[in-house]
Image (cartoon, rainbow, N blue to C red):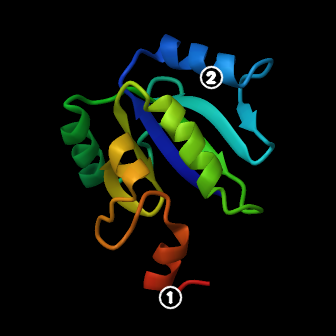
Amino acid sequence: MRSVFVFPAGKRAETIASLDQHLPQQRDPWTLDGNLSIDIDDEQTGYLFSDWDPGDVAVLEAAVEHHPSWAVQIDVSGRIDGTAEVHQLVALLLEHGGVATDDYSAHPWTLQEIQSGTVIDGLRFFDCRTYHELHREY
């Protein structure tokens, strides 16, 4: 299972309403084509940042200019590549600003960077293939 965390610029309620609108009649979690599991995680009642490196949290805080208390967590099934689906969902969630992180780098990705294919430290957003090539994992 691979994960993406999205930190939308809007309010939590707005994000939930958007997910409800685009993925109707489901919640806790929402799913996309049975391959993405989407949920809200937070520090108070969930596990947000519990296994993050403190330096990665500091980089995120600098990017969003505050300490986020919640995020949309997207878990991607290992049965699919998932890149197209993740990009589609992240574009929806970051429509009004914010950033996303993935399992492959600590960089907080903006929607513009994701959509333009920006390369940071040899990787694009959610670039599992290149990550595994760089780390010689199969």
What amino acid is at disc 1? Arg
| Quarter in which the N terminus is drawn | bottom right
Kindly indicate the quadrant of the structure image that contains residue 82.
bottom right
Q: Which residue is mark 1?
A: 136
Query: Which residue: 67% across, 16% down?
Result: 21
Q: Is residue 4 shown to the viewer in this render? A: yes
Q: Is residue 135 shown to the viewer in this render? A: no
Give the percent coordinates (x, y) of residue 68: 33, 29
Query: Which residue: 44% across, 43% down?
Result: 50
Classify 10 Å Cα crowding around label 1: few (below 14), some (14-19), many (20 and above).
few
Where 38 sits versus 125, above or below? above
Q: Earlier in the sequence, mark 2 or mark 1?
A: 2
Q: CA distance from mark 2 to mark 1?
A: 36 Å
The answer to whether the residue labelled 2 contacts the one labelled 1, judged by CB atoms less than 8 Å apart, is no
| Quarter in which the C terminus is drawn | bottom right
What amino acid is at disc 2? Leu
Nearer to us: label 2 or label 1: 2
Where disc 2 sits, the SS reads helix
Residue nearest the viewer, comparing 95 with 3 = 95
Where disc 1 sits, the SS reads loop
Where 22 sits versus 60, above or below? above
Give the percent coordinates (x, y) of residue 45: 53, 24
Q: Is residue 89 left or right of residue 8?
A: right
Classify 10 Å Cα crowding around label 2: few (below 14), some (14-19), many (20 and above).
many
Give the percent coordinates (x, y) of residue 74: 59, 42
Give the percent coordinates (x, y) of residue 62: 18, 40
Q: What is the residue that sits farthest to the front in this orientation?
A: 116
Q: Which residue is mark 2?
A: 19
Query: Which residue: 62% across, 31% down?
Result: 39
